[in-house]
Amino acid sequence: TQLLEQSPQFLSIQEGENLTVYCNSSSVFSSLQWYRQEPGEGPVLLVTVVTGGEVKKLKRLTFQFGDARKDSSLHITAAQPGDTGLYLCAGSNSGYALNFGKGTSLLVTP
Amino acid sequence: EAQVTQNPRYLITVTGKKLTVTCSQNMNHEYMSWYRQDPGLGLRQIYYSMNVEVTDKGDVPEGYKVSRKEKRNFPLILESPSPNQTSLYFCASSLWSGGNQPQHFGDGTRLSIL
């Protein structure tokens, strides 16, 4: 099992602030996904990155895959209360299993 | 609507009483899997299935069984549940196996084993 370390574990910020969440591993991944999970629901896919150095944007969310494909980051600009949730990264090395990090729990207060 | 449906959503039961959590998807996906989510441990894969009649162990398979007799259904069976299986369980499916495939998750089943 390839370990994915997410940081920070918890993050509480005010509306309008910017934040970055990190997902790191010592292993190389062929692809990496980011999910958001809200209370009482299953995770929902936000983005998949597959190329080293790739940057993808989803409105105020910017995702980056490290050049060596061992790490990824999620940056949120001007966070809103609707961004509150658990953010999970998940990596695969072309296998059948998807390995999940433990998640970053984000709380955005008005 | 494309979805993964799990039942029940909540269950409180006692040690040793066999239970089954059902999972059904309507997207004609080949790949299905079960995860458990525990505080501090994250999502861990229990079993997965690449197609009908093809199943394999994930990271934490002990105490669980699965079957895949039809493409749409992938039930999780706890033959003799124990308190350490108290957890939040998720079923997921994707078009086929492969880490870059989007996983579609159900809304979860919260199991409490007393």
Image: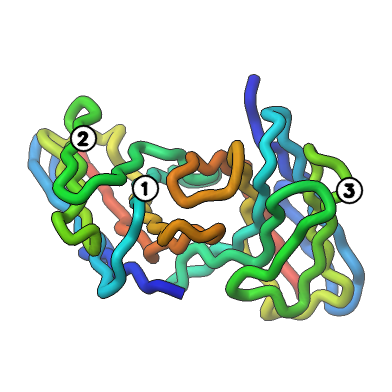
The quadrant the N terminus of chain B occupies is top right
Asked if badge 1 and badge 3 are on a common chain, one would say: no
Asked if residue A85 lies left or right of residue B95, the reply is left
Read off the residue under disc 3. B69
Read off the residue under disc 1. A33
Return the residue nearer the eye: A100 or A95: A95
* Residue type beneath disc 2: Lys
Chain ID of residue with mark 3: B
Between the C-alphas of marks 3 and 2, the distance is 39 Å
Return the residue nearer the eye: B11 or A7: A7
Chain ID of residue with mark 1: A
Q: Which mark is residue A56?
A: 2
Asked if residue B99 lies left or right of residue A103, the reply is right
Between the C-alphas of marks 1 and 3, the distance is 29 Å
Q: Which mark is residue B56?
A: none
* Residue type beneath disc 3: Lys
Spot the residue most to the left.
A17
Q: Residue at x 63, y 75 (%)?
A: B60
Q: Residue A108, relative to residue A105: is it above or below?
A: above
Secondary element at image label 1 = strand
Asked if residue A32 lies left or right of residue B5, the reply is left
Return the residue nearer the eye: A21 or A49: A49
The quadrant the C terminus of chain B occupies is bottom right
Asked if residue B43 lies left or right of residue A13, the reply is right
Q: Residue at x 20, y 42 (%)?
A: A63
Q: Residue at x 64, y 30 (%)?
A: B3
* Residue type beneath disc 1: Gln
Does residue A75 appear anywhere in the picture? yes
Return the residue nearer the eye: B98 or B84: B98
